[in-house]
Amino acid sequence: MVWLKNREDFPGFNSVYAEYFPQQPPARSALVSDFLIDILVEIECIAYKPV
């Protein structure tokens, strides 16, 4: 899940996301929100590391 403070930041965020995940990127949802604290983006993820 990705929350952005400014909708205008989405194209830039999407470009950087594509650099880090060029093939088969993980699924995500993106929302625009007014944060209660002074931040521009918040990302929530679940990671898996095989043992």
Image (cartoon, helix red, strand yellow):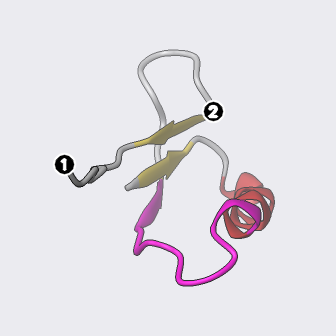
**Extreme front residue here?**
51
Q: Residues within 10 Å of mark 1 (few under 14, many from 20)?
A: few
Using the image as rendered, state which of residue 34 and residue 13 is in the foreground.
13
Asked which secondary structure carries label 2, the reply is loop
**In the image, is residue 21 above or below residue 44?**
below
Spot occupied by residue 43 in the image (x, y as percentages of width and height)? 45, 43
Q: Which residue is mark 2?
A: 40
Does 21 appear above or below 50? below
Residue displayed at 71% across by 70% down? 18
Give the residue displayed 47% in from the left and 48% down from the top.
Answer: 3
**How far apart, in angstroms, are the residues tagged by discs 1 and 2?**
35 Å
Q: Is residue 29 left or right of residue 13?
A: left
The magenta-colored residue range is: 19-31
* Residue closest to the eye, 23 or 16: 23
User: In this rendering, would 36 be left or right of 18?
Assistant: left
- Which label was assigned to residue 17? none
User: Residue 40, percent across and down?
Assistant: 63, 33
Identity, as a three-letter code, of the amino acid under mark 2 = Leu
Residue 19 x %, y %? 77, 64
Residue 4 vertical position relative to residue 16 in the rendered view, above or below: above
| Count of numbered circles on the image | 2
Which of labels 1 and 2 is toward the front?
1
Whether the magenta-drawn stretch holds residue 11 is answered as: no
Q: Identify the residue position indicated by label 1 in the image.
A: 51
Residue 26 within the magenta-colored segment of the rendering: yes
Residue occupying the point 58% across, 24% down? 39
Q: Quadrant of the N terminus?
A: bottom left
